Image (cartoon, rainbow, N blue to C red):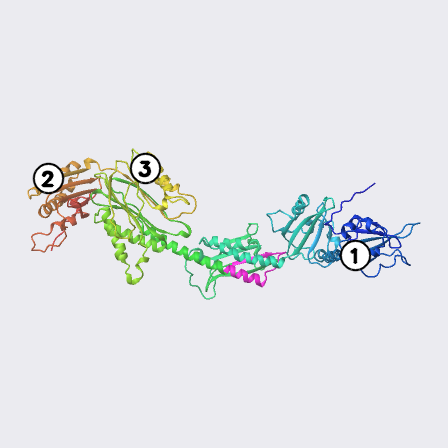
Amino acid sequence: MAISRTVRPEVRGNPFDVLITAAVVLDQRGTVVGWNQAAEEQYGFSVDEVLHRPFHDLLHSGPPPRPLTGPEPQRVWVEIRTLRHRDGGTVPTALHMCPMASPGTEVAWLVTMIPVAQLQQWDTDQAMLYGLFTQSPVQLTVFGPDGRVTWGNAAIEEQFGSRELWVGRSIRDLMPRGELLSPERAESLDEVIGEVFHTGEPVFDVHFRSPTALDPAHHHVWSASYFRLEDADRRPLGVCESAFEITDRYEAWQRVALLGRTSSIGRTLDMCRTADELATVVIPDFADAARVELAEFVLAGDDPPSAPAGEPPPLRSVVDRTADGRSAVHLYPSTPAEGQQQFVLPLQVGDVLLGRATFLRLTPRDPFSERDRALAAELVSRTAVCIDNARRYAREHTIALHLQRNLLPDRLPEPTGVEIAHHYAPAPGPIGVGGDWYDVIPLSGARVGLVVGDVAGHGLNAAATMGRLRTTVRALAVLDLDPGELLARLDDLVAQARIGIHPAHGDPREDAAIGARCLYAVYDPCSGQCCVASAGHLPPVVARPDSDAGLLDLAVGPLLGVGGLPFETTEFRLPEGSMLALFTDGLVQRPDEDLDVGVEELCRALSQPGTSPAEACSVIAASSPDGPAQDDAVLLLVRVQTLAVHNMASWPIDPVPEEVARARTLATDQLTKWGLEEATFVVELVVSELVTNAIRYGGAPVCLRLLRDQDRTLTCEVSDGGHTSPHLRRAGMDDEGGRGLFLVAQLTDRWGTRYTREGKTIWTELPLSASATEREIPLFG
């Protein structure tokens, strides 16, 4: 039976293989009797040119070959000669002389010829292969089609023992505790070998970690590559693995990578999360388990307590886990058990002990080296700084939040003519407490002032600045100023006086009030009119009963402290039941989106009919965007109502002294209609005094108005055309006048003056819960 065999020229076998090498056949006299095609291609002579010629004729120089007859005709030898080429050149050639003898015939010789360079290359290849088999540190292993070891070089024996320990066994049998460190390629080396065998695609630089049978107490790490072995017809025979140990190099890489990952520690300014980030960095590459304990004062965000020297603060465990995510508390006995390696490092900044970190390694991992301890000390030191920063932030955040809560209104008033709901949410996390604020300020004549504002920045400085601005706005609101005028005065205080910060005490441009935003509105329930002015703040949203909600068309002025530009007041009428929404930009900010998107969502929420301010406020607060808040969020919702006509009464008064008596009569008659006869005495006195002063010092037009706020407050107002401001004084025993305004101040809860385009109005408020007869009349000295 004939057997065919494919010859692959890239496979370097025996260089004198007659199937692929130039060959000549000589008789015993050295005459050429055979010349193959390879010889013709290699030396250029055809068969006809060399046949029956002495082989010596082909030699370039030197003596003829050794005698082909003699006492040892069957011996094989190799000679180095220079053969001629037909083109006139020469070819240094190695001659392989092999006798061919058969019974009854003369001895003939088969001479195979290869260039000397090819022979030298073959010798080098053989030396290299021999070195790989016997001396190379690279471990060579051949796996058969079933994935079991069929052959290995000497390096395999050095690390895994004699051949009987590993021949015929799979990787899983040899290293059952092995771990593939390149899990994105496969789950095990068995899968890698099987994939290479079936696909023929080589795989390079696979990292694998495992103890060995000769060294079960330590991990070793290898870098391995795999390629398929094939026969001449490219049928798979198995898989060859070349591997070399990189344990030291891999651990060095891990240390460098570990330091690189420290940038992920401490980004959140959350102490417990920072501790967990440390454990995430060290497990599993550096340690098998980690525990982080923090002092109680750190977790509370307090300063270090005073304690006796050498006495550590009480600690509480905040992180305690292993590589598989389970609790590692059972791994930390007072004394490490056999096979455990630990050391404990303090989390310390300066002389302050914040806590401690404990790292644990389990067999078969190597114990912590000095380099490992130095690396761990660096990691723990960086973590301690981050935890201390988080502690300081938590302390400042708590103080700022407490300050802000105290500066914001604890409970809003409930003025006549408005129904109010409000929402405030400070920005959580590292952004910190901001400077957003809101306020509701009762004004004279049943009017109400509405304020929202936003100070740039976060923290204590922003909260304190917010408190200063809010106090200033309330003080200016008492003057009953037009909203544009109020913002103009506030702007002057910020730009010029820096709200109490003198330039000599620092750069006034650093004042957080510079660039703050504020919106101030005044609603009058008697007329249904609303006046609004803005200093760089978003306009309010108006939802009227007969239309969808939308932003008010408002002229927005510059930021506070910029100066040089006026603040324009916008007046508009709000129908009964309209909703007015004042808000800061934190309420409508959306990640990676324009403010318009959040404003549109707010308008849709306020366009729902039949929704109360409290219900709308809850819905809007619950629909805040997902993810971390960008800023503080403030929402002030106001549903307006007009004061009922039967609760208001006004009369024009002629500016003559005789009208004082008529004014008293008009007021007492109105009180009788309202059933408020018990207030007659005080009201008669107030009306008499204020009308008299208006006629005497103010002039036309004079008007008297009474407002009843249900059963809470009675307001008495007298308007005139003058702009002089009345002032309170104490009259002497011999003075004939000067006591009237003093009596008014004593008999009423509040009184004041507001100015209009036509003149001024003197107003007083009298609570209806207390009878005038219960008030004491002051005596004058």
- Determine the CA span between mark 2 and mark 3: 47 Å
Residue on which the image places disc 2: 665
**Residue 135 horizontal side relative to residue 692, left or right:** right
Q: In which quadrant of the rendered image does the N terminus lie?
A: top right
* Residue at 83% across, 56% down: 57
Residue mark closest to the camera, 3 vs 1: 1
* Residue 450, percent from left and from top: 27, 45
Residue behind mark 1: 83
Say what secondary structure mark 3 lies in. Answer: loop
Kindly identify the residue that appears in the image at 82 percent across and 61 percent down: 62
Could you say which is closer to the camera, residue 681 or residue 187?
187
Q: Nearer the viewer, residue 270 or 6?
A: 6
Q: Which is in the foreground here, disc 2 or disc 1?
A: 1
Q: From mark 2 to mark 1, how far is it between C-alphas?
A: 149 Å
Residue type at mark 1 is Leu
Q: Which amino acid does label 3 sit on?
A: Ala
Query: Is residue 672 shown left or right of residue 126?
Result: left
Count neighbours of disc 3 (C-alpha within 10 A) and say few if under 14, some if 14 to 19, many if 20 or more.
many
* Residue 504 x %, y %: 28, 63
Q: Mark 3 points at which residue?
A: 549
